[in-house]
Amino acid sequence: MQAMIIYDSVYGNTEEIAKAIRNAIKIQMDTKIVRVNSVNLSELIGLKLLIIGSPTHGGSPTEAIQDFLNQIPEASMKDINVAAFDTRLSTRLVKIFGYAAGKIADNLRKKNGRLIISPEAFFVKGRKGPLKEGELERANAWADDILKNYSV
Ligand SMILES: Cc1cc2nc3c(=O)[nH]c(=O)nc-3n(C[C@H](O)[C@H](O)[C@H](O)COP(=O)(O)O)c2cc1C
């Protein structure tokens, strides 16, 4: 397997985005999608591309995503293309707390991952969703950009 998308999702919106990304990536490479609570660290070995996505909870990734990131050994992302996304509300108030995607990206970069695209946000209309119009299409376009930036 070459690419893996790891995500968390409480209400299904981040999962929808993750699946849209998977559908675009899998056209070019073998791609596995897995919810964070079912992933095994050993599955990261030999990956070429790792994409991690999370709902924004209190300005950060979910606890499950944070726990998973904390388990990834130092420097183990060397030579792996990495990318991060989140889902979030578009209200102004939440800006104070920050967002999940940047924090995921920082973690992967610290472990020597090759961040090949800016962390991306996809918007929900309310806490439970649904996604705003056009977000699945944006996810598709973001995945296409990942493929363009991907290096072996
Ligand atoms: C406990 C909790 C905390 C949240 N905190 C934030 C936040 O700080 N900023 C934000 O934009 N959205 C926040 N939200 C809204 C989530 O971003 C939204 O529920 C999520 O994008 C939906 O994705 P999901 O369907 O994959 O769970 C929060 C939601 C929950 C349940």
Image (tube, rainbow, N blue to C red):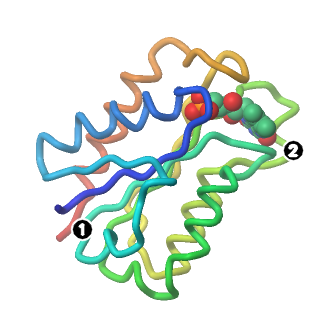
Q: Secondary structure at mark 1?
A: loop
Give how far across and how far down residue 45 sits, in percent. 29, 77
Which of the pair 25/119 is nearer the observer?
Answer: 25
Q: Nearer the viewer, residue 140 or 16?
A: 16
Instruction: Name the residue type under label 1.
Output: Lys
57 left or right of 148?
right
Please tell me how crowded label 1 is: few (under 14), some (14-19), or many (20+) other residues with Cα within 10 Å. many
Quarter of the image with the C terminus is: bottom left
Number of marks in the image?
Answer: 2
Seen as rendered, the residue at the extreme bottom is 75
- Numbered circle sitting on residue 96: 2
Kind of element beneath mark 2 = helix
Residue 34 image offset from top left, x and y in percent = 37, 49
Residue 56 to residue 77: above or below = above
Could you tell me residue 117's position as x and y percent? 41, 55
Q: CA distance from mark 2 to mark 1?
A: 34 Å
131 in relation to 99, above or below: above
Residue that appears at 59% across and 51% down: 101
Instruction: Give the mark, 2 or 1, whose residue is nearer the N terminus.
Output: 1
| Quadrant of the rendered image holding ligand 1 | top right
Query: Which-is-in-front pick, marks 2 and 1?
Result: 1
Q: Residue at x 47, y 22 (%)?
A: 135
Residue 141 placed where, x, y %? 32, 33
Q: Give the number of the disc on residue 48.
A: 1
Q: Amino acid at mark 2?
A: Ile
With respect to residue 45, does 99 lie above or below? above
Taking 58 as reference, is 13 above or below it? above
- Location of the N terminus (image quadrant): bottom left
Residue at image coords 83%, 29%: 92
Q: Is residue 26 left or right of residue 39?
A: left
Please identify the quarter of the rendering in which residue 150 is found: bottom left
